[in-house]
Structures are given as structure tokens and as C-alpha cells.
Amino acid sequence: MRFGHFDDDRREYVIHRPDTPLPWINYLGTEAYFGIISNTAGGYSFYRDARLRRLTRYRYNNAPFDLGGRYLYLRTADGEFWSPTWQPTQTELDDYECRHGLSYTRIGSRYRGIRAETLYFVPLGETLEVWRLKLTNEQQSAVELSVFSSIEFCLWDAQDDATNFQRNFSTGQVEVADGVIYHKTEYRERRDHFAYFACSEPLEGFDTARESFLGPYRSWDRPVVVQQGESTGSIAHGWQPHGSHHVKVTLQPGETREIGFVLGYWENPRDAKFDPPGSQTVDKRLVRPVIERWLRQECVDEGFAALGRRWDELLGGLQVDTPDGDTNRMVNIWNAYQNMVTFNMSRSTSFYESGIGRGMGFRDSNQDLLGFVHMIPERARERILDIAATQLPTGGAYHQYQPLTKRGNNDIGSGFNDDPLWLILGVAAYIKESGDWSILEEPVPYDNQPGSEESLYGHLQRSLRYTLERLGPHGLPLIGRADWNDCLNLNCFSDTPGEAFQTTENASGGVAESVFIAGQFVLAARELAGIALCLGRPAQEYLDAAEKMAGTIAEHGWDGAWFRRAYDFRGNVIGSASNDEGQIFIEPQGMCVMGGVGVEDGTAVTALASVRERLATPHGIILQQPAYSSYRLELGEISSYPPGYKENGGIFCHTNPWLMIAEAIVGNGDGAFDYYKRINPSAREALSEVHRCEPYVYAQMIAGRDAPTHGEAKNSWLTGTAAWNYAAITQWILGIRPELEGLRLAPVLPSGWPGFTAVRRFRGATYHITVERGGSRSLLVDGAPIDGDVLPAAPAGTEVTVTLTL
Ligand code: BGC
Ligand code: IFM
């Protein structure tokens, strides 16, 4: 069953009914000002940091699930009112359509002969969002309409805002000037910043106090102001600052009118002191022209067109035409788009991530680069340097950092022993794409401490050393608090039955080991060796270390038919046929093969056959089997999940592309593509009533075979699944793969495909690629045959024609 359809020409997903199984959301903003918006206009906005600079309030896990957002109400003179985005009044609309596009959303409906369509987007280069409401009177007679807007301001720090009421009910401050509502509450500091909410039309009235707008004991479904048709002109003093405009319009039959709203963030430069000291009013001199500009319709039209052009350019980095429509749609539009979103948001803000707990992730953000770097390499470069500056002098890493301060997050701390190795993989991806070797010479501090700078190359060396200095009893890397699998906490133990487990304290002294990190180490050491060789620096040490680790995996990490997962604190094996549950895990199968382990001796093929036999389901590949049926102190959080969910036997989509890549590495194009299709959201669209999450983006998890809800997705949008699937399909199956020496073309296609074409921008040149099956293998570049599969470097600005016959 479907709840909408893809409009590929317009690069939109069109939702046909407001009551989707779950709120289906989209993102506004691509640079610094962001918001999430659901198909019924729910959601919130923030400037740069979803926790510390939250503009509008949102209550997660509400009932209804999605309540609070960018709401508008229409009211006719007879007193009937409705929300043209369905929520919050839930009026049964005569028709309804939501179009989620690339960084914009358009929600339209018709009721009582009034067509209303609202376009929401963030113009490039601005720290504001535009709502453009278009009203058309499709009745035979003139109609007088009242329009009310509504947003609830957040007092900046979303965590504090949701908890610290004794203080916050006294801090709220607003100001209304020339029809603009300014929210100027300070957050424990007096900086010259504020939010504003403006409307293009002369106001009939306004409200800035939530209680005045809603009325006591009421909610957004029937605000007293809307019901009565009259604003109160309230000014919030403490309590809950709110923003509402009231505009009246009379529409003749067939007439269309547009009304603009602008919600934005403003911070005056520190040295711009216009107002006399002690002034209690917001300094509006710099912001006024910005507001006025974005209330003008031509400006909005131009800004919206510019956003579209920006996306043309971003997506122009790679466009493919394959025999499979779901592949084309995901690669050309939605997967690339999701990559931008994960790059910007990391794991902070979605319908499942509250914007409070998680900043940028050392592990996560490095992986997100894989799908983003070809779009804007300069931003990837900046991100890498930010991440590396949070690395600790030991080579270890803070697990996360706050985007606003760019400082490591002490609450979560460090000790996830896979973290440092992702930096090598992220940097390698950047250099492969951009050819920018200079990044390695950039001086980067450790833990942001001035004076501790070392070249980025030095950071990468420390990352490898971090693993080598932390090997366990079998010579495998110590896992620390966890590796990629956050919930495999193997240094949890207790000598007293029933005693609470201990992780952090014991992680450093714990001796649990990870075969996953071993595989990741082999991959990362070989990557660093490749970089070193290109630079003419010593590389043998890394190659030897990789070789040795591969040997250790063969000795202690191979179980006979697959790679083992780990050894726990007491040296007991995890992920082995000898275990009663958790016999086979997906992660080491993918990572070891990606590192090249077992590829020559055939064990890789054996491991992949085991995955297919034991872990593959029609909805994707399960993380491990059999799922743990009860809690096990020595394994930690993984066994706290019910069987079939999350890390305990869920289809953790992030890992699936590792298996696609592994299948491609051993030359099995059919196997790789088969896995690709199983979790491709577009290919699952027809199953929307089972899948339930958005059919246009990947979710972190699909419930596994052991779950009663097998096939149901959760935690959509912010997942490493996006970047890795993009890498799997584009670089390994289609085989258009950036390498240090240039662009490699090495497809491993499904056998039924006659070929495909692609246009790929790479280091400034544009490659027009045709891959076709034919008599004998040849690779022609601009008509001339070349050896090997790496395309010769072409000068920036040139067009290259490439034909590969398989
Ligand atoms: C979740 C993991 C997540 C981790 C982050 C766990 O509860 O299951 O998926 O990575 O929290 O700390
Ligand atoms: O690897 C992690 C990731 O960092 C956050 N989400 C869950 C994954 C698996 O535990």
C-alpha cells in the first residue's frame, strides 16, 4: 500500500493523505539555519545547533505523535476555521497534498472552496525560513478570510527549555515593532541575538503570549483567538513566548493572493553597538532590510529558484541511468539528498533524534563524508579538520562534539576504540575525491588545545598507533566501551550476581577484543599505506601491521564458516558456532572482507555464503542470529533489546552495504544488487503499510525476523546507511570509484543488466560514462583504448567520454 508517489521530474515525494503511518518529514536548510518539517507542517527550527540555538519549541513523543510546528489557520466570517496543513485542527479537507522536495516542502489543500498552498524553505546564505502562503478563492462569491499564524518560541537551549521551568517561566521577553515579533529572551548570557517572525501584510492583530493565543486549558486544535477571530495583542512576560499574526483578506471569485511569513535568527556583530548602552530594545538596523527583502514576493521566487539551481549543481556530481528505476531515483535524487542531511545533522535532529543528546559524531561524521564529499569537497575538508581537532593526544577520540562549540562532548567521553580509525577512512575518501593532498599538512590541535598542533597526517598515524597500543590477549584490538556496535559492551561484568554492570570505569582496563576493529584496522592501515606511498613516505610499517592483523584474524577471528565477532572480558568468544545465541554477526563479515581479509584464500566467499544462509531476509540482512533471548550482563546493552530490534537481531541497515561491497569485492554482482534492492526505500514503497517510515530515505533499522513487526522501519533519516548505500551502489556495483590515483571504473553488475550510463564530475572534469556488455573487454577514453581501469586525469573543465565494454 502506498501513501503517495514519487514525482521524479520535480524531485519530490508527493504524499496523498495527511495520516501517514508515521510523520513523514523533510529538512529545511542546507548551511546553518535548519528545520525539520512533517507532512502536516509539524517540526521545529534551529540555528546551527539543535540543542543550544533552538528557535521554536517541539515536544517529542507527543500525542498526537507530531504536534507543534509552523501552523496557519484560516477562518471564514461565519466563524469556521481549519488548518490548511491538516494539523492541528485535523479538519477533513476536500483534498490534501504534501510535496517534500529538496530542502523545501509544499503543503496544499482545499476546503470550502479555498485552495491554500504553503511553501516552506530556507533561502541560500540566510539564517531564516520563508513560508509563502498562496490562497485561491475557488467559490462563486467573494470570501473574507482571516489568516492566523502560530509558532511557539523555544528559550534557546532545548534541554533547559524542557526542564528548567523554575527559571524559564520568568525569563521570556518579546518585543513587537512595525508588525514584527521579536523573541529576545536571553540564555544566561547577554548576547545580541534574537529570533523574529514577520508577515508581509498589514496586521489586524498579533499575540506573543501562548496562553492568550490558545486560551487557558486549550491546545492548538482550537485556539481561542482563532475561534473568536480576534488577536489580543498580548505581550509575553515570562511564561511561554509565542508568535502569531492575524491578517484579513477578501478574495474575489478566482482571485489568488500570496502572503509571506519569515521566521529567522539574527545575531548582531559584537562590535555593532548602535543602541545606547542599557537599551532594552532589540537592535533592528541590520536585520530590518533582511526581513523586508524576504517578505517581497519576487525575492522569494528568486530565492526559491536559486535553491533549485543549487540542487541541480549538487546532484550534477553524479547522475546515472541504469535499467533499474529504484536505483536511478535513489542515486540521482534521494540518497544524495539524505547524504547532505546526514552530513549536516549527524545524528542530532530528526523525528527520532531529539536534537538534544547528540552532536556531531567522530565515528558517524567520518562515515557521513563518504556520501557527501563529492558534492562539496570544501565543506568536507572543513569538517575533517573540525573532527580531527577533537582527537585526543592518545590518538583516541571524543565520541561526539557539539557543532556550535566544536568541542568534544565530555558527557559521552571517549573509549569507543573504533573511533580513531574512521578518521583515516574519512580522510582517505576526501583525498580520493578531491586530489587535495594539502589537507595532510594542515596543523591540527589535539583536544582543541592551542600549542598541541600536529599535521593531519600525524593524527592519522596516531589513530593507527592507538589500535596497535591496545591489543588484547589474542592480539586483537581491545574493544573499549564498544566498537561500531554501540550496544556490544563487552567490558561489562560483575562478580556479584545481580550487581549493576559497569562499563566506562572498566573499559580502559577491560581486555575484551573486537574482530570488527581488527578488520577495520586492516582496511585503515592499507589506506594509510596507500597514502604514504603516494607521498613517498614510509609505508611498509603499515602494510606489515595490516598483514599481521589479517593473520591474527585468520588465527583467532575465523570460526570455520564465518568471522567471529569478539572476545568478552573473560576471553569467551562471541559470534561463534559454539555460542548458544549470537552465533554469527554481520559486522565482521562485511568489515573483514572490505579490508581484504580472506579474499585470496576464499574464506571471504565462505563467510558471505554463511551470511546469505543465516542472516538474509526479504527485508534486509539481520545484524546477528540467533537473537539474544534474555539479558546478559557480559554483553551489555545489545541483550537488553527484545529479539529482532536494533542491535539484537534487527536489520541494522547501516551494515547491509558492507555486505553489498563485500559481494562486489568477490565479484558477485547479483548478490550485491540483490541486497541493495532489499533495503532500497523506493523499492519498498509498495510495502509502506509494513515499512511505515518515509519511502524516500533510508531508516537506521528495519525490524528483524525475530520481531513481531518484521519489516517495520524505525529511526529514519539520520543513519550511516545513507552514505554507505550510496558508496555501495555507486562505487562498487556501478563501480565508479574515486581512488588516490584517479577515477576507477570497475563495475560489478547484476547479470541481467545490459549496462548503464552515468555522468560523473570528478576533480573538476566531467566524465560521460557508458558501460555495456560486448564481445571482449575494452576501455576507451575519448575513443582511445587504455590499460587497466583507472581513467587518466583530465584537466578541470574538460569533458571526457568513456566507454567500457564488459
Ligand atoms: C542504540 C544505538 C545507539 C546508541 C548510542 C543505543 O541505545 O541502540 O543504536 O547507537 O544508543 O549511544
Ligand atoms: O555505530 C552506531 C552509530 O554510531 C550510532 N547508531 C548506532 C550504530 C550501531 O550501534
Image (cartoon, helix red, strand yellow):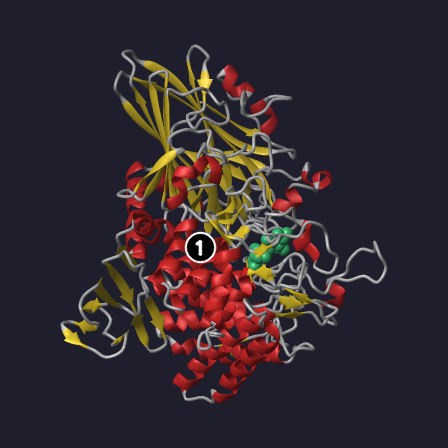
What residue is disc 1 on? 722
Which class describes the residues within 10 Å of circle 1: few (<14), some (14-19), or many (20+)? many
* Left/right of residue 260 with respect to residue 547 in the rendered view: left
Q: Is residue 753 visible?
A: yes
Residue 693 as seen in the image, left or right of residue 240 = left
Quick one: which residue is furthest to the left in this view? Answer: 783
Q: Is mark 1 within 8 Å of ligand 2?
A: no
Q: Is residue 382 above or below residue 248?
A: below
Which amino acid, mark 1? Answer: Ala
Residue drawn 56% across the image and 68% down it: 563
Count of picture labels: 1
Outermost residue toward the right?
A: 496
| Residue 511 higher or lower than 317, as above or below | below
Location of residue 606 in the rendering, given as x and y in whole percent from the top left corner: 48, 67
Residue at 59 percent of width and 72 percent of height: 557
Which percent across, then down, holds residue 307?
32, 48
Question: Taking the image as drawn, is residue 290 in sight?
Answer: no
Quadrant for the C terminus in the image:
bottom left
Please give left or right for residue 524 compared with residue 106 in the image.
right
Residue 539: percent from left, percent from top: 47, 87
Res 665 → quadrant: bottom left
Q: Along the line of sight, which residue is nearer the eye, 552 or 198?
A: 552
Residue 423 location (% of width, % of height): 51, 70
Q: For this view, does 496 lie left or right of residue 275? A: right
- Tell me the quarter of the image containing the N terminus: top left
Q: Mark 1 falls on what kind of element?
A: helix
